[in-house]
Image (spheres, helix red, strand yellow):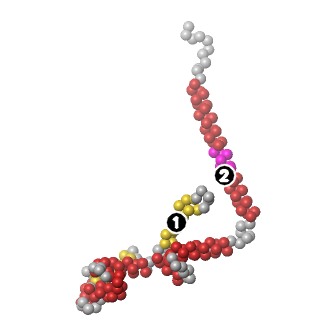
Amino acid sequence: MSLSSIWHKFLGGKSTPWADVRYVDGKMSLKDYNKSFVEQLRHKHGSLTIDKDDAAVIKLFTDRENIEHEEPKLEVKHTGIEEDGRVKMELDWNPAFIRHLAENGIIAETEDEAIQKYLAMLTHQVADDITPDMLSPEDVDAAFHDLDDEAQAELEEAARQIAEHANVIKGKKTRAKRKPKVNGDIHG
C-alpha cells in the first residue's frame, strides 16, 4: 500500500471515495481503493455495474478511462495485390481515432462509414495536391519507359549471365568426356 493510500484512508475514512491511481506505460490502474469509491462508480455507470463484483466495476472504470485517454491510431496493412491490379489492404483503428474524426467534422453512423469518408477526403486532397505540371502524360510515359528500359536491361544481363554460366558448365563436361590423345602405340 502506498503512502498516498494510507494518507487517504487516514483523512477520508470510509465515507470519502479515494483510490491509489497509477500509470504504467500510459495505462491507468488502481492499486488500492475504498468501498465509497466503488459505490461512486456504481452510481456513475448505473446499469453497467449491476451484478458485478467490486473488481469487475474497477476493471470497467479503468478500461473506459484508458480508452478515453488513448492516442488516435489508424494502421494500414498492405496484404497484396488482386488479380485485377487493385491493392488489397486491411485497416485497423481504435475508438480514439473515430472520436478524433468526429471532432474534426467527419461524422457517420458507423465506424466503417467514418473511415470511408476519411479515406475519400484523403485521396481527394492528394489528388488536389497533384498539379498538371507535376505529372504530365509525357512525364508518366517517360517514367514507365525508363522503368521498361531498366527492366529490359536487367533481363538481358541475367540472360547473358545464365548463358555464360551454361557455357562454362558445358565446357567442363566436354573436357571431362574427351579421351587423351595417344601418339603412337606405347603398349606394344
Indicate which disc residue 110 carries. none
Q: Residue at x 64, y 75 (%)?
A: 125
Instruction: Indicate the secondary structure of the residue bearing disc 2.
Output: helix
* Marks 2 and 1, how far apart at CA: 30 Å
**In magenta segment, residue 49:** no
Question: Residue 57 sits in which quadrant?
Answer: bottom left
**In magenta segment, residue 157:** yes
Q: Residue at x 65, y 43 (%)?
A: 159
Q: Earlier in the sequence, mark 2 or mark 1?
A: 1
Q: Is residue 71 visible from the viewing direction of this image? A: no
Say which residue label 1 marks: 90
Apparent side of residue 34 relative to residue 168 in the rendered image (left or right): left
| Quadrant where the N terminus is found in the figure | bottom left
Viewer-side residue, 47 vs 37: 47
Residue type of the residue flagged with mark 1:
Glu
From what the image shows, is residue 70 above or below residue 36? above
Question: Residue 160 sits in which quadrant?
Answer: top right
| Quadrant where the C terminus is found in the figure | top right
Q: Which residues are magenta?
A: 152-158
Mostly what secondary structure, the magenta segment? helix
Apparent side of residue 182 relative to residue 131 in the rendered image (left or right): left
From what the image shows, is residue 147 above or below residue 182? below
Q: Are marks 2 and 1 in contact (CB under 8 Å)?
A: no
Say which residue label 2 marks: 151
Apparent side of residue 174 relative to residue 73 in the rendered image (left or right): right
Farthest right residue in view: 138
Residue 108 in picture, x, y percent from top left: 54, 79
Farthest top residue in view: 188
Residue type of the residue flagged with mark 2:
Ala
From what the image shows, is residue 1 above or below residue 157? below
From what the image shows, is residue 137 above or below residue 179? below
